[in-house]
Amino acid sequence: MRHALVTAGTKGLGRKVTEKLLGAGCTVTIHYRSDQGAAVELERDLSDYEGRFDFVQGDLLSKDDLNRMTLQTLERWGKVDILVLNAGPYIFERKKLIDYTEDEWHAMIGGNLTSAFYLLKDIVPHMREQRFGRIITYGFQGSEHAPGWLYRSAFAAAKTGLVSLTKTLSIEEAEYGITANMVCPGEITGAMKEASIEESRKHPDPRTPVGRSGTGEDIARTVLFLADDHSDMITGTVIEVTGGIDVLHKHRKPDE
């Protein structure tokens, strides 16, 4: 039985990933930052999987918390086969680089990039020992090509850095049976983050070329595919799950 650690796994896209992994037979450590209520609600909803998951709280900006998350996971489950870096701090206000505060900059780089470094430093050695690992990071549409993203400079800088980190890791760790890939969600907002594909099809979305909004299930299905034992030929890959919508250039002016 494979064990997964999912960051920010109690709600949004992460909740659907957690549900899909449990449904596929995995055990799961579910990370959350501060919303204990969401953890309690999810625990109740996952009663059918009792004994196959637990929760770990931690701030991705804290090295000590990240180290503790790994230690707690290994003490309880003895391994981490699948690491899903679902958490990705994001600033919704659109503003230029010079308008970011130092704290905002450090939160974007720390939460999206530096946190990956610390988790990988702790977890990859164990994956090496077992000669198996599936590492899945998240980016944004077009991040593989390091584009400029208007009013998203800090987030974009962190995620394009994570693209390179993911690809480098895929080369360095291939000999140990470890793969590393990135998933890039499209525009998935509000209730759609925890919705099913079936639900989405009931509500056509003319803004998306495929005719429906993306959902958390779309992302979870992609994660599950990459996490499969037989997906070892897929590594160093960036997969966009956007339905064809142009997320990057949707907004051009801050007053739109």
Image (cartoon, rainbow, N blue to C red):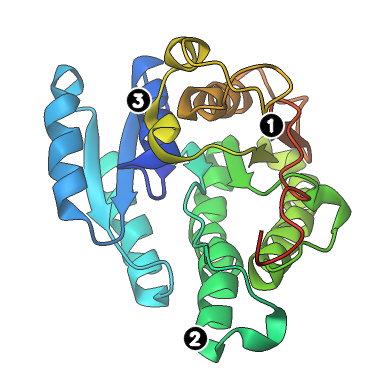
Q: Which mark is on residue 103?
A: 2
Left or right: 152 in relation to 246: left
Q: Earlier in the sequence, mark 3 or mark 2?
A: 3
Residue that badge 1 annotates: 242
Q: Say which residue appears at 44% left-offset and 30% top-offset.
A: 192
Q: Quadrant of residue 157?
A: bottom right
Placement of 12 over or under 219, stated as above or below: below
The residue positioned farthest toward the front in the image shown = 255
One can see residue 26 in this view: yes
Q: Residue 224 location in percent, x, y? A: 53, 23
Residue that badge 3 annotates: 19
Q: Earlier in the sequence, mark 3 or mark 1?
A: 3
Placement of 190 over or under 150, stated as above or below: above
Q: Residue 109 location in percent, x, y? A: 60, 73
Left or right: 45 in relation to 150: left
Q: Which mark is on residue 101?
A: none
Q: Secondary structure at mark 1?
A: loop
Q: Secondary structure at mark 2?
A: helix
| Amino acid at dot 1 | Thr
